[in-house]
Amino acid sequence: MRRNVAELLAPAAAVLLVALVVAATAGAWPPFVAVESGSMEPTVERGDLVVVTATERFPWGELTPNADPDAPRRLGGAGDVVVYDPPDAERRPILHRLAFRVSAGEDWTDRADPALLDGDCDAIDACPAPHDGYVTYGDANGEYDQSAGIAPVVRDEWISAKALVSVPNLGWFRVGVDAAIARIGLLPTLAGITGLAAAAGGVGAVLIGRIGRRRGELRA
């Protein structure tokens, strides 16, 4: 009985162990972000899973915006892609690229790409910059976040992680989990996931056992 229970729970434990190892390496929790919009297409699409790390985690260094001449390549473009939480509690965390850093009181439109602006500084709520921070944008969007009114200038403390790589389509599971948590709660969702993992492990164990017995019969 104990052996059967252990075999059923083994897949769930393995998934948890992998997540913990990735989190320890990346220095961020959760170490994965599921993409829910197409604002970073074509490199990152809706339903992709993005592996993230802490903002100053070795060996990836400090945050580097697109405008920096030594900006690294991240997710198909120059400059770090970060996860930040705007002050509006109703908005989900945003995964966008850092454009350039600004200082409090600066008319940052002088340094901006005109193609990503909707008017001059007087027409943009986030200009002049109300505080030090970053101007950001989604690769597929036609404006800076601050020009489009998506977010104010992004403070350093709003940035929780930066992106490393993306894996196509694996984010749909995370999107489904988030939806389930919002609908039925955390504990019922965890119980459901554990049950599904255990069931999958049980089915796999049965199939492997049958294959092993059949090979044994053939050898006999």
Image (cartoon, grey):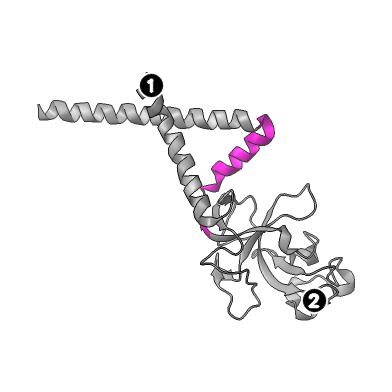
- Residue farthest toward the right in the current orientation of the protein: 122
Q: Is residue 177 magenta?
A: yes
Q: Position of residue 127 (x, y in %)?
A: 85, 71
Q: CA distance from mark 2 to mark 1?
A: 65 Å
Q: Nearer the viewer, residue 13 or 193?
A: 13
Q: Helix or strand or loop: what does disc 1 sit on?
A: helix
Which residue lies under the disc numbered 2?
108
As drawn, the label of residue 107 is none
Residue type for callout 1: Arg
Res 211 quadrant in image: top left
Label 2 Cα crowd, 10 Å radius (few <14 / some 14-19 / many 20+)? some
Decide: is 49 above or below 218: below
- Dividing the image into 4 quarters, which one contains the N terminus? top left
- Magenta-highlighted stretch: main secondary structure? helix
Res 57 quadrant in image: bottom right
Please indicate, yes or no, whether residue 168 appears anywhere in the rendered image: no
User: Which residues lie in the magenta part?
Assistant: 165-185
Decide: is 107 above or below 9: below
Q: Earlier in the sequence, mark 2 or mark 1?
A: 1
Which residue lies under the disc numbered 1?
2
Q: Is residue 67 magenta?
A: no
Q: Helix or strand or loop: what does disc 2 sit on?
A: helix
- Residue farthest toward the left in the current orientation of the protein: 220
Q: Position of residue 91 (x, y in %)?
A: 75, 50
- Dividing the image into 4 quarters, which one contains the C terminus? top left
In the image, what residue occupies the spot 53% across and 65% down?
A: 58
In the picture, measured across the screen, residue 178 lies left or right of residue 122, that is left
Residue type for callout 2: Trp
